[in-house]
Image (cartoon, rainbow, N blue to C red):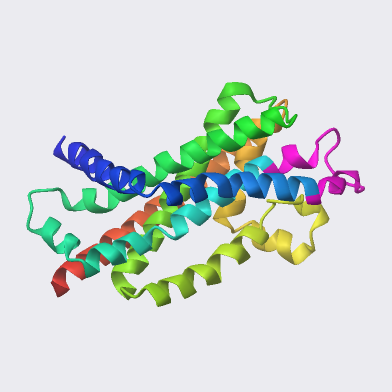
Amino acid sequence: MNVFADTWHMAQRHIRALIRQPWWIAVTLVQPIIWLVLFGGLFKNMAELPGWPEGLSFREFIIPGVIVMTAFFSAGWGGMGMIDDIKRGIIDRFLVSPASRSSIINGRLLSGFLTIAIQALIVLVLGWLMGAHYPGGALGMVLLIVIAGIVGFGFGAFSNGLALIIRKEESLIAMMQFLLLPLTFLAAAFIPLTLAPDWIANVAKFNPVNWAIEAGRSALIDSSPDWNLILTRTGLLLVFGALMAAFATRAFRSYQRTV
């Protein structure tokens, strides 16, 4: 029980720190809105291409992609806070406290999930106000948010694990920049994979970002959701999240041995 209580206390710490940075909150919440408005307006004629899913507007198509991309980007930079806490000696102080060791990382991931959920709700409401339809209803929206949260958990754990190993902001920034945009564009975020080059479609089969987008899109905008696809992709994401959590735990233990 202490593990859950400690995780929640750690999450509250990060949430309070976030609340004290209103500009960061504004940018974090506005950024996905900008993506939705700009991409939705700039590429709306893509829906007229041959092979585009019938009856689906470009804005409706990209909403799941924008939500997953936002979760992915937010989580990808999560390790920066870990490096800052290491440099300020905060992590070392936690290590001599009675707090559960796993809660030090899990608290960060939980606060990140809450941020992702709020961002996703804003994008969904804005999309609806702009005329998007969600045949999947409330269940589809909840599933999309949960799936985005799982992506955030996995990549957040990966980012925190890297931070514990690298411990340099510049190196972490370089590593995440190397991953963020390629993984986003090697997925069906902005166009169906049937319209993409074959090599991109083949790479996307192994891309966790694409698993999340496909599952979330089917849950939200398909009148008859493909539950086999949703459950399969969500299962793969859970495995990915578990592997990244194991990586972060191992990295944390390595860090402890150096203290």
Q: Going 34% across and 54% down the picture, which residue do you hit?
A: 245
Give, as a single range, the part of the protein colored magenta. Answer: 42-62
Task: Give the x, y percent position of residue 190.
Answer: 73, 51
Residue 29 in the image: x percent, y percent?
Answer: 52, 44
Residue 255 is left or right of residue 117, and the answer is left
- Position of residue 191 relative to residue 83, above or below, is above
Q: How many marks can you see?
A: 0
Q: Which quadrant of the structure image shows residue 259?
A: bottom left
* Camera-side residue of 85 and 133: 85
Is residue 46 something one can see in this rendering? yes
Residue 97 image point, x, y percent? 8, 53
Q: In the rendered structure, does residue 54 fall within the stretch colored magenta?
A: yes
Q: Residue at x 46, y 59 (%)?
A: 76
- Position of residue 49 measured from the top left corner of the image (x, y, whole percent): 90, 48
Task: Name the image quarter holding residue 126.
Answer: top right
> Depth check: 249 or 116 in front?
116
Q: Residue at x 52, y 40 (%)?
A: 119
Q: Is residue 107 left or right of residue 44?
A: left
Could you tell whether 50 is left or right of 201 in the image?
Answer: right
Quadrant of the snapshot with the N terminus: top left
